[in-house]
Image (tube, grey):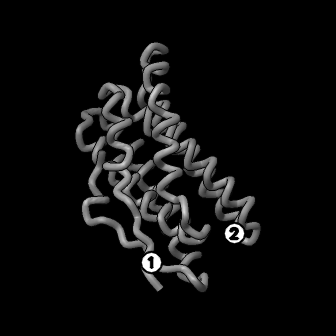
């Protein structure tokens, strides 16, 4: 059985993130987290036996978005600006899963969660406000909690293969 190839989401989403000013990047990523939460809800409907855990993952994604939105206040003008590239970024994210069986999609998502944790820590490393850094660390841990849950479930599922991430996939955007 061949391994699932997990993309480098920082590279995949980089062209869309590049259209967002530095102050808006965390909020843009929070919107992508909300998209991931919706994706988890879709998977929960598709896989009823895993629904409780998938809905819990969706809740954690929403908590990440809520935390980032509170930590990074932006103007209504910047809010409108960051929503412009969002549909194309979400399409690119969804395309990364196209053609894969649902359980393999979850394997890719587990890697995406670890990449997300690295991204939040990367943003925190460039921020001076200790409260914001602590909030971003909580976000990183929520990402890892999702990844760990996905890994544990998938390791027990027959017919899934481990994700093979590009070594650069751990880099923050």
State the image coordinates of residue 133 (x, y, percent, origin top left): 33, 41
Is residue 150 among what the camera can see? yes
Do tag 2 and tag 1 residues touch (Cβ < 8 Å)? no
Viewer-nearest of labels 2 and 1? 1
Q: Nearer the viewer, residue 12 or 76?
A: 12
Residue 73 sits above or below residue 31 on the image:
above
Identity of the residue drawn at 66% across and 64% down: 53
CA separation in Å, label 2 and label 1: 18 Å
Q: Residue at x 37, y 56 (%)?
A: 115
* Residue 15 to residue 103: above or below: above
Residue at figure coordinates x 64%, y 57% from the top left: 56
The quarter of the picture where residue 72 lies is top left
Identify the element where label 2 is drawn: helix
Question: Is residue 131 in sight in this rendering?
Answer: no
Q: Secondary structure at mark 1?
A: loop
**On the image, which quarter does residue 100 sit in?**
bottom right
Residue 58 % position (x, y): 62, 52
For label 2, count other residues whose C-alpha is less than 10 Å away and answer few (under 14), some (14-19) or many (20+): some
Q: Nearer the viewer, residue 104 or 66?
A: 104
Q: Residue at x 28, y 47 (%)?
A: 122
Question: What residue would you read off at disc 2?
Answer: 50
Residue named by callout 1: 162
Q: Position of residue 127 (x, y in %)?
A: 26, 35
Front position in the image: 149 or 43: 43
């Amino acid at each position: 059985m061949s391994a699932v190839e997990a993309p480098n989401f920082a590279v995949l989403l980089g062209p869309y993130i590049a259209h967002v000013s530095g102050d808006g990047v965390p909020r843009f990523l929070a919107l992508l987290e909300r998209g991931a939460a919706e994706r988890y809800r879709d998977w929960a409907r598709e896989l009823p036996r895993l629904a409780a855990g998938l809905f819990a993952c969706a809740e954690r994604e929403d908590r990440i978005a809520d935390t980032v939105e509170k930590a990074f206040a932006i103007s209504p003008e910047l809010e409108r600006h960051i929503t412009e590239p969002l549909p194309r970024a979400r399409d690119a994210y969804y395309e990364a899963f196209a053609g894969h069986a649902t359980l393999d999609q979850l394997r890719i998502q587990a890697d995406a969660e670890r990449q997300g944790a690295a991204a939040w820590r990367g943003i925190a490393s460039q921020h001076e406000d200790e409260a914001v850094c602590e909030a971003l660390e909580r976000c990183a841990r929520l990402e890892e909690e999702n990844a760990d849950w996905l890994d544990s479930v998938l390791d027990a599922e027959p017919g899934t293969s481990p994700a093979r991430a590009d070594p650069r996939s751990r880099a923050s955007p």
